[in-house]
Every structure is written in structure tokens, then in C-alpha cells.
Amino acid sequence: MPIMVHLDFSSTHSPSPGEFLAKIALMSAVWICALFIVKSTGRTIAGIFWSHDVPVDAASIPSKLPHPNQAGSAVPFDIPLLKATDDQIHHFMAFRGLRYQKGEEGALQHVANSAAQYKGQLYEERTLKWIDDHFRLKLKGLQYPYVDKHWNGWPSMWIETADHIREMFLSSIVVIVEHCTNGLLLPGLYLLTHDVRYYNLALYGEIAFMVYASALIAMSYMLEKDVTIEQMHRSVWPMLLVHHISSMALCVGCIVIEENIPKDLVCTVLLALVGLTSSLHYVGQILDFSPLAQSNRPLTRLCNHLFCLASQILFRCIYWMKILYDSISIALENHGAGIAAIVGLVLFLFTLFNVDFIKFHLKATKGCWMKMQEGKMGKEF
């Protein structure tokens, strides 16, 4: 049988094991290449447009070293660079392990960029500590890490962003592209046209992405090095792995027992969980690292928080009840109690994930609002 028959995405029947694996292999190759291109393009754009020197008159250096870096909001550097003494500049550059020679061409520019990089490293430390405290240690009452106000907006954003946050920023773009393709574009096209090719491409694409993402998490454990797609802190890897495996199980089940599953319901689930709410979550992460963050554009960030929280409550809470009922009822009616129990277990794991997701965005929205009120009070006094 020609190989093209095995890779026919217009089929409405359950695939053979060979056909299933061939399609997964093809979609994996497609997504590995696509994600590499997206991330490389993002890195190139950042290098060209977001890596300009920080203006010397916008930069500051800290008077105390190491600079205080408590949880929550950043403590701004307190000495404007143009007002700093030679001793203060020498002290800062020595702390950074860098050379400073007054009068050399570009000397102050070098100091300004170094200060911006140090500011980014402090934010990275706070962020990674918060993630570990929240997800691994399960500590309560944590203060969310807010990035300091950017000194030069987008043109110098990349200089003010530390290495790990850069990777998280680019990874968020990568995940958004995948989610918007397999969770928004393809399911949406199916609901509009009912062309089964879009349905199959969405499911096989989602499985391929989850297989690749899970394999990279496993490889990261083995190598003791973060090579994951998400580039999140190690404490988040177990949760990501459970999420990816659960997603794979649902998508594989939809393909294997394809004849008795309402495709409209499957596409609605993809839209609700992947294309809309999850994509918005990663958009928020990008905003948190950018000149559109809380410290720069508080109203913009609050609007995003409110929209994201509303979508989480609508799709992962209210509409999720209907998804649970419909999915388990259909599984019970067409495939018996055993399959229904498995579907119920996987959906229960997703329910726990949804609860955690909504709680996170509720706290984040409250925190954003409170920060705005603190800012108003600070201006008044």
C-alpha cells in the first residue's frame, strides 16, 4: 500500500497502528521544524529591534551591593548614572566584574547596559524563587514578582532581560503559535466547514506536540539540564508532564474510537482549553516580561488579567461542567463503564488543573488591582 494512503488525513475511520504512528511521526517532524523556526525568528527579532543600548540618561546604579532583592516589587536603583560619582561607578563595575575607565569612548554606555543587565538578573532571581516556592514548596502568602519599570521600553527590552527570562519569553511565543494552530485555527476551521482534515490535523498535531514536549521534559531530567519547550523552573516539570500525558490520552482516545465521538464536542474542548484560555495565559506571561508589564502599563496589564480571568471562569469552570457531562455520558453510552471511568479519571486531572489555573489568575488579577491602588496612593502622598 502506498505510504500516502497511510498519511491521508481525510479518513473518518480509526487508523491502524502503523498508520497512526506514521501520522504522529510526520506531525512531530512538522512541529519540531516549525517550533525551531518560530523560536529562531523570535530571537532574531529580539536581537535586531529590542537590543539597542540603554540611554545613559535613563539608567541608574544601586548604592548598595548586592542590591536588595526581596519578594514582590523591584527596589529601583537609587543613583541616576549621570549623577553618580567615579567611586560609585567603579564600585558597581567592580561588583559586576567589569572594567571601567573614565574618559574612554562608550565607558558610561557600558555602565548603563551593565546596570540594565543586573536589573534583569535580579528580576530573574525573584521570579524563579517565586515559582519554586509556589509549585514545589507550596508556600502561602507569597508576593508575586513584578518586573521593574523598563528604562527604554521595547528598544532596550532584551538588554534588561536575563537569559532564563529570555528563554521563557521566546518559549511563550512558541507555545502560543502551537496552541493557536492546533487549538484555535484548525478546530475553528472544522466547526465552520466540517472538513475532517482540519479535525485530524488538530488532533495529530496536538499529540505530536505533547509527545515532543514530554520527551524533552524526560530528557531534561536525564541530562540535569533544562531543554524543555516551556523553559519553566524544574519544580513545574511534574505538573507539565501530567498535563501533557493527560492531553495525549484524550486526543489518542478521540482518534482510536473516532466513529462514536462527536467531533464538534472535541473541537469545542480544544478551543476552550488550548486555543483560548491557555493561549491567553501565555500572552500574560509575555506581558509580564515586557514593557507592557504592571510597572510600565498597569491598566493594560489589568485589562489582560480581567479578560484572561473571565475566559478561565467561563470555559474552565462554567462550560467545563457541560464538557464533563457530555464526555462521560457519550463514553458510557457508546463504550461502557470501563472507558467512561478512564475518561472520567483523565477529566478529573484536568479539573484539578483548571482549579489551580483559575486560582492563579484570580490571585494575579487581585494583585494587579492592589498594585494599581498602591501606585495611586503613592502619587497622592
Image (cartoon, rainbow, N blue to C red):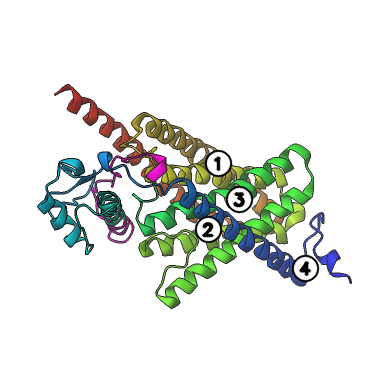
Q: Going from the N terminus, do you reach mark 4 or mark 2 first?
A: 4
Q: Which residue is drawn at 55% across and 41% down?
A: 276
Give the Cα distance between marks 4 and 3. 28 Å
- Between the C-alphas of marks 4 and 1, the distance is 30 Å
Q: Does the magenta stretch include residue 3?
A: no
- Residue 290 in sight: yes
In primary-sequence order, the first of circles 1 and 2 is 1
Mark 4 or mark 3, which has the lower sequence index? 4
Look at label 4 and name its amino acid.
Answer: Glu
- Along the line of sight, the residue nearer the viewer: 42 or 227: 42
**According to the image, label 3 marks what residue?**
328
Return the disc, 1 or 3, that comes first in the chain's sequence.
1
On residue 19, which mark appears?
4
Whether tag 4 and tag 2 are in contact, CB under 8 A, the answer is no
Mark number, residue 345: 2
SS under mark 4: helix
Range drawn in magenta: 128-156
Asked whether 358 or 161 is in front, the reply is 161
Residue behind mark 1: 276
Whole-number angstrom distance, CA of label 2 to CA of label 3: 10 Å
Bin the neighbour count of mark 1 within 10 Å (Cα to Cα): few under 14, some 14-19, many 20 and up.
Answer: many
Majority SS type along the magenta span:
loop
At mark 3, the secondary structure is helix
Cα–Cα span, label 4 and label 2: 28 Å
Q: From the viewer's perspective, tell me whether residue 50 is left or right of residue 323.
A: left
